[in-house]
Amino acid sequence: MLKIYNSLSRDKQIFTPIDAGKVRMYVCGMTVYDFCHLGHARVMVIFDMVSRWMRASNYEVTYVRNITDIDDKIIKRANENNEAIDVLTQRFIDAMDEDSEKLGIIRPDIEPRATQYVQGMLDMIAKLIEKGHAYQATNGDVFYSVRSFQGYGKLSGKSLEDLRAGERVEVDTFKKDPMDFVLWKSVKPNEPNWDSPWGKGRPGWHIECSVMSAEHLGAHFDIHGGGQDLQFPHHENEIAQSEAAHNCQMANFWMHNGFVRVDDEKMSKSLGNFFTIRTVLEKYDAEVVRFFILRAHYRSPLNYSDQHLDDAKASLTRLYTALRGREVSTNIIDWNHPQAQRFKEAMDDDFNTSEAVAVLFDLAKIKTDESISLLKNLGAVMGILQRNADEFMQGETSQALDVDAMIVARIEAKKAKNFAEADRIRKQLADAGIILEDTPQGTTWRRA
């Protein structure tokens, strides 16, 4: 019986799908003006894990993750680069796809782009105006009237009075209320624009997800997910728009993954502790990064450091060591097996991957053919441990030590009759578990 922590109710609840046997899930995706960072990696890996577990639990899943391809930051970056917006966004969409593939992410079933749904946004804005939830200001922008929606603040737990007194409130003399947020932005120089009943302009950010989720999953669906930073104001505003427009609850469950921290500080560009996925993958194997993300519970903060990545690498290597040289059955998992039951109980307890990973280590210690096969097959459910063990371990060592370069250095040392240096290199590699083999055709290496 799957239980999920619902940010809306602030407790774990038994998951019952709206339609028996089917799960409809929407996750807020990336704004594509730059390379994806570790925070994006966590969102992608976590909801890939959720989707995988739902499918392993025999649900028919429709997983939608949107792409925001029109936004203030996108326009600013395109203007700075003197680059067409569609060229810029496609470049970073391609980069995102490359990064996610390396991380073992299964592509979402549907990846809508905001610019493809402008007409739907116009329709929803018109409906909100008609129902008294939105208005056009004297500057041409269309705003959502927050006080018109009685349930505003129910997701974040914030009251309108507290919000008005807080620093998040944007001062805008065109608004009827400081808390109102923009649905449609009137045209400005050097910006893309569309025709609308309120003049040329472009959509605000929040309206995009309300329209794309309803288009593909219906006005009422099972799960809405995203990073913790989106809970307010983005997800709060989505609820206000969608529920006012459709007169029904938007999503039954709201899931939010925790922040990524760097050496115990929140990752941010302003602090200079900002890491893109590709920067991290220059130093660490992508499966190590995925394992690092999964072994922490998705709602907890994830503290990034080289030490934590090194520890994740060593831990994943131990699991691969157990698989090394073993014949592994890829039959269907026997969920009656005690360790498989433990794994299932962990995953059904709000996707407790940290406990599920502990089951994998226990299986690795047992070392029977049955346990090793189960280790491999449960790993597949999490999107790990599917490579050849020797190739993984060889690749990790090669990446850490640059074995090929060391072999060349050893050959040069021998040519210079610096046998002490040649012996030192051989010993360094041997200490790392690398055995050199000198043959008439050259020097090769293998894992000990």
Image: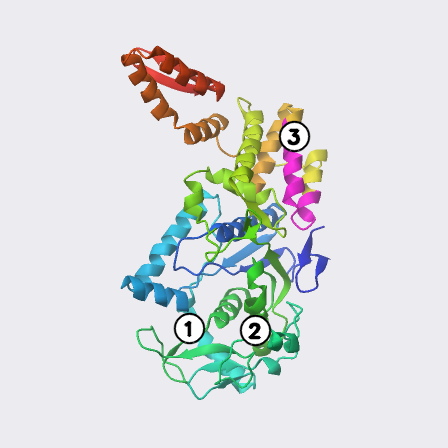
Decide which of tag 1 and tag 3 comes sooner along the chain: 1
Residue 314 colored in magenta in the image: no
Is 440 situated above or below 57?
above
Residue ID for mark 1: 118
Q: Position of residue 353 (x, y in %)?
A: 63, 44
Element assignment for label 1: helix
Q: Is residue 188 visible?
A: yes
Q: Residue at x 33, y 73 (%)?
A: 191
Q: Is residue 85 visible?
A: no
- Mark 3 and mark 1 in contact (Cβ < 8 Å)? no
Give the amino acid at mark 2: Ser
Stretch in magenta:
345-364
Q: Residue at x 34, y 16 (%)?
A: 443
| Main secondary structure found in the magenta portion | helix
Decide which of tag 2 and tag 3 comes sooner along the chain: 2
Q: Position of residue 137 (x, y in %)?
A: 47, 86
Give the amino acid at mark 1: Val
Nearer the observer, 291 or 430: 430
Residue ID for mark 3: 363
Q: Residue at x 37, y 52 (%)?
A: 94
- Mark 3 and mark 2 in contact (Cβ < 8 Å)? no
Tell me the CA gap for discs 1 and 3.
Answer: 51 Å
Would you call the spot at circle 1 few (<14 residues within 10 Å), some (14-19), or many (20 or more)? many
Q: Quadrant of residue 404?
A: top left
Residue 353 colored in magenta in the image: yes
Element assignment for label 3: helix
